[in-house]
Amino acid sequence: MPTTTATEEAARQPREVSATRGDRARLTRTRIVDAARETFVTHGYRTASLRDVATAAGISHPGLLKHFATKDELLAAVVESFEAENETLFLQQVASEDPGALAYSLLAQRNATIPGYLPLFAALTGEASTRRHPAHERMRARYADLRDVSEAAMEEGILHDTVAPDRDPRGEAIRISAAWDGLQVLEQYLPDRVDLVGMLEEHESMLALPVGWREPSEPPPGAVAVAAPVPPLPDFSGDVWALGPEAGTDVSGYRVGRERRARIVADATALFAEEGYGDTSLREIAERVGVSKSTLLHHYASKEQLLRAVLAERDRGIQGRASFVPGNRAADELRALPRGAAENATDAPGLIEVYAVLSCEAVPADHPAHAYFAHRYVQTIDHFAALFQAAQADGDLPAHRDPEREAVWLVALWDGLQYQWLYDRAAVDVAAELSAHLADVLPVT
């Protein structure tokens, strides 16, 4: 048996020590990333500090900095760990003995079992939509990859008859991934009303049907002579947050005061869209406006009061769009929705930005805007559900489609498309994708 000389032993020892140190370093990094997942979910990425993560990981702050010099680096590692796990599962599904099967609901079901995944990504989707966010480019690349992988999955589905041959693989890939994002956020606000996995499963099965499919025994769309009543738009002015003059731009008082309040709301809107509510201070808003903090507090006594004003003004801007024209039939009103989406993207991108950031940031129940968004989602879904019910009574919505389910999906799809548009405005046309979806749901002769 060969013997090891003292020289060989001495030469090998440093490598063994180095390997041991490397193993310890990898284990420590894994522990830090796991602690960061939980901390970012519990406190939010913007609010949590590296000291919070170090405490959760059971190491010192200087010890953490040896592995991750900035919080941005740590966030990237957390996102990467989630995505690596998803990619592995997706590839396993592609390589399975069920060719053409779509893996969206399977991935969603698996993600739901990972502690913290859904709240973190629900928040990150909107938070990182602003170009200045440290995860923006990584999330932008993630969406580009997801569109490509999903398109390939749709094409594979067409080859194996799990997706109808008349469906557009690229469009369907964009829409299902967008709805998935929107459903993740909605489920955090309305867990008793939104079933992410169940809705994705149902949508996957519907993709096997031709575009605009309806039962052969059903009358053609628009056959009902007397249209069902079209429900009115929801009135957000009665929202639980619309209390007192702080809920919007005050039109009372002197012109100078009115103009200053309007400027404060406009600049706060821009800052909330750029940095989020939690990371924006009243001092930063005052500096953007060009007034002292005490002057700002004269008009808005707290940041929460100013947040109410921003959200109320955002609702007024969206509801006052010139493109809205009431329809004689519910289906006509639903089909007209993409016109409003196109107008918003052209004329009011800032309103889309602040909505995306704040709706995702406010997912935690203790966020000051959580009740506002929960209430708004309920009203919006109820309104669309009533429209779809009326469209079904008119014969325009096929009998196999559930109005409640279609309302939830439409809200989720619209929000998700807006998120994707904020990451890549050249790759995603919100109005065109909404039109394609509604053409499938509300077929015309």
Image (cartoon, rainbow, N blue to C red):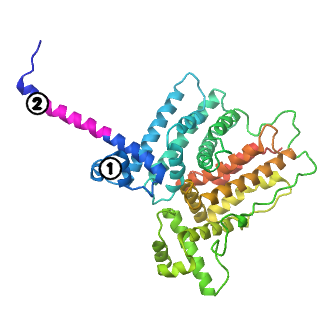
Q: At x 38% / y 44%, what residue is drawn?
A: 33
Query: Dot 1 surroundings within 10 Å: few (below 14), some, or many (20 or more)?
Result: some
Q: Up-down: is 265 above or below 122?
A: below
Quadrant that contains the N terminus: top left
Q: Which residue is mark 2?
A: 11
Any magenta on residue 18?
Answer: yes
Any magenta on residue 50?
Answer: no
Image location (x, y in percent) of residue 240: 68, 63
Q: At x 55% / y 81%, what residue is drawn?
A: 298
Q: Amino acid at mark 2?
A: Ala
Q: Up-down: is 36 above or below 242?
A: above
Q: The magenta stretch spans which residues?
A: 11-27
Discs 1/2, front: 1
Q: Which residue is mark 1?
A: 68
Q: Is residue 239 visible?
A: yes
Q: Amino acid at mark 1?
A: Phe
Query: Dot 2 surroundings within 10 Å: few (below 14), some, or many (20 or more)?
Result: few
In the rendered image, the residue lying farthest to the left is 6
Identify which residue, 242 or 204, lies in the foreground: 242
Mark 1 vs mark 2, CA separation in Å: 32 Å
